Amino acid sequence: MSDQPRPKTVSGAKPEIGHYDDFMEHAAHFLYRAYQECGELAEFDLFGAKHVLLSSADAQEAVYRASDDQVSAAAPYQYMVPVFGEGIQYGAPVETERQQVRFMSDGLRPKRMKTYAQVIAEEVEDYISDWGDEGEKEFHDTFKELVLRTSTHCLMGSEFRHRLNDEFGELFEQLEHAISPEAVIDYQSEAEAFSTRDEARARLQEMLMKSVNERLAANAAGNEPPTDMLQSFLDARYKDGEAMDHELIPGMIIWIMFGGFHTSSNTAAWACLELARHPQYQREVIEEVDKVYGNGEDLSFAALRELPITEGFVMETLRLHPPLLTLMRQVVNQPFEYKGNVFEVGTNLVISPYVSHRLPEHFPDPERFDPHRPQPDHLFALIPFGGGRRKCVGNAFAFLQVKSILTALLSRYELSLVDAPESYREVMPSLILRPSSPCNLRYTRRK
Amino acid sequence: MKIVADLDLCQGHGMCEDTAPEVFRVVESEDGSYDQVEIILHEPDSGLHEKVDSAVRYCPNRALKIQ
């Protein structure tokens, strides 16, 4: 036997299923236990598939900097193919997928971001205009509704947004239900959630294609093209000069919605919950917001960028409550080496922002919410959006959106808890961490 | 002031180009993936420092560094 280092194995594996039961019960807690038991590298097993959790900024950097032909994102995420569609993202060759994410980045250029900032600010103002002097709301559902409006407006334009009904949100929820630990094991099984997924996807295709065709007709009629993601996708060109097949555009919209919808609405809900839990920090954020409003500035892109205290608050929210529990890669082509450990082809490399954000070497007293924490120097320590070339392309958009919501709210209202502090918990009904339901908060008009 | 870009991190958002066009340019990449930053002025004179600081601060991916 060589004395080559290898990861420790997490305790509690059962025959055949491995650690699946523990993972299913609460994946975040399971992964945190894995780190506590094993340290930087923790091996576990899900139905015979080998997984290694890597928990250190250096290990995260090594994975995020590795190229697609060393570690594949497509391999572990094949269960997303029925959600976005063949020909899109991991249902396309990696050379095509790389160009499709460039189309997204093109749609998020500064000129467009400035327009989105305005759209979001108007939507938020409109949404809270009838809230009155005080009241209570369930903030998780409230922000789901609001972010659905803002994001469809920025993505699909105002006609689609104003046609929006409950069906669109419900269809999305059906897609999301199919993203579960069961899907990770077998996303093509006969389970009901998967046939519901396929029906929801087909209906979304129909709804979104209608808007694509309307836009094409408007463009052909010589109308000024609006600034939104749909137009950006229609204008996009692959490097050979070809446009996207129009039938694929609904998949692009679903993909970007999936990345941004519940992740942003959850983060806004968590941020409000933390504001209500910490009145002293809430005062600091309000003071900063008042400075911007006090100057008579509107919530422009530039003004929203200059809110370091609010930004620190959102970042700390994302640290403690990262919406995505894990980011996976699979070793392909040849074994992947990290600090002398050799991971064979087929091994799933798991990075968990939930665990990484609790590493005491970067975040002392990690469970304490502290918006004054300095950002760690290591670029790969704080990773709510992942890292490297595959980092979430919408991260600046997400910040813009959440800051826009918070500033509009706090310029009018103070937030406080309705229920006993300990009743607000962190739950994981799907692979997204969210506040327990109901997440009731009280808002009171500021004096 | 000397500016360096970490191209593993750049996704071609163009925030830097928008903030300090004298110093940064975003160019198409060969394989059609994300556009990439190109630093036109590696050692800009002091009149541009403030703009460059903003560009570095606003990069969504912290791909720029001042050495």
Image (cartoon, coloured by chain):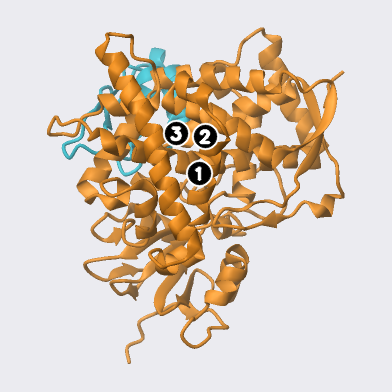
Residue under mark 3: which chain is it in?
A: B
The outermost residue toward the bottom is A1
Q: Is residue A327 above or below residue B50?
A: below
Q: Earlier in the sequence, mark 1 or mark 2?
A: 1
Name the tint of chain B in the rendering.
cyan
The kind of residue on which mark 2 rests is Ala
- Residue A186 sits above or below residue A139 on the image: below
Q: How far apart in space, not on screen, are marks 3 and 2 (Cα)?
A: 11 Å
The quadrant where residue A29 appears: bottom right
Give x and y (percent) for residue A9.
Answer: 49, 80
Subunit under mark 1: A
Q: Nearer the viewer, mark 1 or mark 2?
A: 1
Percent of width and height locating residue A125? 65, 18
Residue at image location 82% in from the left, 54% down from the top: A422
Which chain is assigned orange? A
Residue in front for this viewpoint, A164 or B35: A164
Which amino acid is tagged 3? Pro
Name which residue type carries label 1. Answer: Phe
Q: Which residue is mark 1?
A: A172
* Quarter of the image that includes the N terminus of chain A: bottom left
Query: Mark 3 vs mark 2: same chain?
Result: no
Circle 1 residues within 10 Å: few <14, some 14–19, many ≥20: many
Pick the front one: B19 or A446: A446
Identify the residue at image location x=31%, y=44%.
B8
Q: Which residue is mark 3?
A: B60
Q: Mark 3: few, some, or many residues within 10 Å (few <14, many ≥20)?
A: many
> Which residue, given by chain and number where applicable, does mark 2 sit on?
A398
* Numbered disc 2: secondary structure: helix
Quarter holding the C terminus of chain A? top right
